[in-house]
Amino acid sequence: MTVVSGDRTVNRRAIEALRNGVPNGDAVRVLGCDQPEVESRFRAQLAEMDASVGEERHVPGLLISGDFGTGKSHVLEYLEHVALAENFVTSRIVISKETPLYEPAKVYRAAVQSAQVPGRSGMAIHEIALSLRQDSPSYAALYMWANRPDSGVAPLFPATLLLHERLNNDPELTEHVRNFWAGESLPVKRVRDGLRQIGELAAFSIRTVKARELAEQRFTFTAQLIRGAGYRGWVLLIDELELVGRYSLLQRGKSYAELARWMGRIEDLQHPGLAAVAAVTDDFDLAVLQQKGDRDYVGAKLRDRGTDEFMALAARAEAGMRVIERDALSLEPPTVASLESTQRLLRDVHGHAYGWSPPDVQTLGVAMRRAMRSHVRRLINEWDLLRLYPGVSVETEEQELRPTYAEDEALEQPTESGDNEEDAPVNSVS
């Protein structure tokens, strides 16, 4: 681990982020990632991407777990930097009331809005579209895949790809197509009019697509679009998965099913060219799957609905819960050596940031069970006080915060297409 640079602004940004417990790029570049197994597993995921596309399968996902404040978000931020350096498009998705895991359309929009493209700073989908080169082998592979009957996406997607390629003299429609790829609606009449302009109307049979199917197909298409633009693939980094524990039982079941999909555990729903990493609290298994009873009751309650749709959903939900139970990779707790190394590094960064020489702070012998974020914030807070009030005696008091898994009615909301989302046609293709 090394200091970012001698630049005072960069170091101050890193300290501010660490002080607030919200990692940013500067903080990650300063501290690195002291989780060798997680990093090794993630790099193996990235290395597997090319083969997975050729074999038309989803790269198995990675679920990491850790106590509150142990650095899960910091690890995800670090992995994002690794992926960008390896020429992957990345998306950080924080599960929240606005982005519930059980709602693929909202997750997709969050993924697109947060997406970063290597070497580019504009809106991700537009940057990807601008990177498409029709004379490149990657674009040819994209075009051939999109027009295959077994591509897994509706004819609307290859139709928009053709319009984007051929209608350079219609910037308004080109913009509509890019916005559709970003998750917005696109009237079918507009697509048909465009196809008529280029004499290709008869080549595509565009029909309504169910809302959930369209959202899932967007992920499939965008992963291929990214590769068609010359990037290696798409990496989703999903944070705060533990919020699922506060949903209603039905929404928890749908969320577990979505987790199974992102982890690549659903054979008939694969996204070649896409890899996911998710983070969850390490007591979720005990508190929600066991004590709350989800492991025993969620699948049974879904099967009680009696339809084929809910039978399939129950099986997927159970697959997602098994991932949490059996496959989560626990973050390694801080050691004396790692804490000492972190203190030396942070002392240099704080000194560069504020132009002084911070003293050693005797906090490393306190409660080794404390999370790394707690150690880091304690160091920074004490240095802040010693810098402002030299010679003062500093004593820091801390209060442990724990996540709650009590159901929250405020998180209960209908899906975008209504309660029976699977039967509702999407307005963009009706």
Image: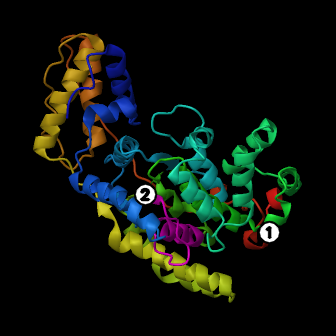
Q: Residue at x 40, y 69 (%)?
A: 324
Residue 406 appears in view: no
Secondary-structure class at tag 2: strand
Q: Position of residue 371 (x, y in %)?
A: 27, 46
Residue 294 appears in view: yes
Secondary-structure class at tag 1: loop
177 left or right of 371? right
The segment highlighted magenta reads: 252-277
Q: Position of residue 322 (x, y in %)?
A: 41, 76
Q: Position of residue 126 (x, y in %)?
A: 63, 39
- How would you rate the neighbour count of disc 1 (Cα within 10 Å): few for under 14, some for 14-19, many for 20 or more? some
Mark drawn on residue 401: none
Q: Upstream in the sequence, badge 2 or badge 1? A: 2
Farthest-out residue, front? 135
**Is residue 413 or residue 178 the one in the foreground?**
178
- In the image, residue 307 above or below residue 206: below
Which residue position holds label 1?
424
Amino acid type shown at disc 2: Ala
Q: Residue at x 14, y 47 (%)?
A: 335
Q: How is the image coloured?
A: rainbow
Quadrant for the N terminus, please: top left
Which residue position holds label 2?
278
**Is residue 249 or residue 98 the one in the foreground?**
98
Q: Residue at x 66, y 65 (%)?
A: 147
| Residue 125 occupies quadrant | top right
357 left or right of 56? left
| Residue 391 occupies quadrant | top left
- In the image, residue 418 above or below residue 76: below
Quadrant for the C terminus, please: bottom right
